[in-house]
Amino acid sequence: MRFNYDLLPGELLTFEEIALRYMQQHPDEKELTARGLLSPSTSYRNLVIRAVFAQQEINSPIEDLLFVSDDNERKNYLRRFEHYLKNQQAFLYFRRTDEIKKENRWKVVGETRVYAMLDPHSAEAQNLLASRGFKLVLMRQNEEDEYWQLFDPQAHPCFPLSRKVQFLVVLSTPQHKVPSAVMPGTEVGRRVKARVFQRASQAEFSAAVKARYGACVITGTRLTERHSWPWVEACHIDTQENEEGFLADNSVDNGLFLRSDLQRLFINRMLSINAETGQVVFNTQLESDENISPFYQSLEGKTCVLWDNVPPGTRQRLRNLR
């Protein structure tokens, strides 16, 4: 009996069937996973994409367009898609609509390439969507995230909830016409990369600073697991940016672990730490000093509780702030 190990465009298969056929075609490679948009689901050092598993309600109602959210340093989606865009390498593409999901199956789209990558704010993204009758709207935003909703030609929302869309990936498949309204090879700009890469490196930085001190450098206040908010937070001493718009120094030596209220005073230069003695100093030149000093009077001139834990590299950065 002859088994069919091909993955033919248009076929509807369970993930188990897809994984089996892939294994038969590529016996020397690792097996496929469907835990995220890409397989492998995480790939920090390796830029490989074996397959894409896209779902309508999460990634896009449009087959040749992906809305990417929640990228981080472990998933590494941006760098991986960018690598495949520049090298025009192909990967397998599987897709699931709301109807197919009920049957626990995936549609085989076939071998696919990245045609372009777009910033959701860009005119290219808006023009591309408008050419399909869709509209992408920024619903709300905060310091870290932007929440977008996609509306179809009938003005119905496409996502159950607004999504934290970071970038769009335009795909090229044998079954689709060449995408119009966008130039091939378009890459996302510095704004998108700064938000994605900075968040990834910020998480690593925060973890390293927390591990070094474990408590507020100034007061000794510890971060407790029972609090859902960051009572003590990591912050950068030197906040200069490099040419790409990222923080130039994201090393642990450039960080302090401070109680949240003190962190904000430090960031706004209302509070400083003497690099020689470790004493806390409030800026007496500020108009707001009358409101700050009475509340924090007990800290003025006191040596940081964890000053002995502050290494020479960090002290030098404090010294450079003068």
Image (cartoon, rainbow, N blue to C red):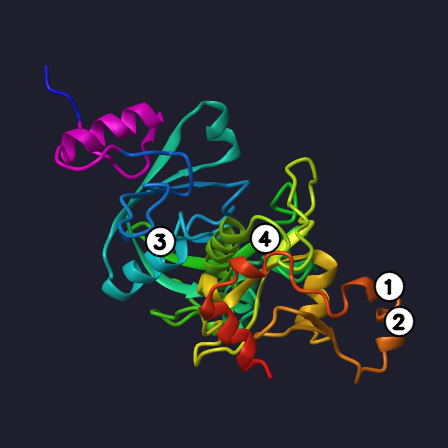
* Label 2 vs label 4, nearer the camera: 2
| Residue found at the very far top of the displayed protein | 1
- The residues bearing labels 1 and 4 have C-alpha atoms spaced at a distance of 38 Å
Q: Where is residue 111 in the image (x, y as percent from the top left)?
A: 26, 47
Q: How crowded is mark 4: few (under 14 residues within 10 Å), some or many (20 or more)?
A: many
Q: Are marks 1 and 2 in contact (CB under 8 Å)?
A: yes
> Around disc 2, counting alpha carbons within 10 Å, would you say few (fewer than 14), some (14 to 19), or many (20 or more)?
few
On residue 295, the disc is 1
For disc 3, the marked residue is 176
Tell me: 16 left or right of 164.
Answer: left
Q: Quadrant of the C terminus?
A: bottom right
Task: Decide if residue 322 is in sight here.
Answer: yes
Task: Give x and y (percent) for residue 275.
Answer: 57, 74
Q: Nearer the viewer, residue 140 or 210?
A: 210
Q: Name the residue under label 4.
A: 164
Magenta region includes residue 53: no
Residue 59: x %, y % from top left: 49, 46
- On screen, 8 above or below 192? above
Give the residue number, with chain letter if any, for mark 2: 291
Q: What stretch is highlighted in magenta?
A: 5-31
Most foreground residue, 142 or 224: 224
The residue depicted at 72 percent of the width and 73 percent of the height is 281
The amino acid type found where label 2 is placed reads Asn
259 over 314 or under it: above or below:
above
Q: Is mark 4 on a helix, strand or loop?
A: loop
**Foreground of the two, 15 or 145:** 145
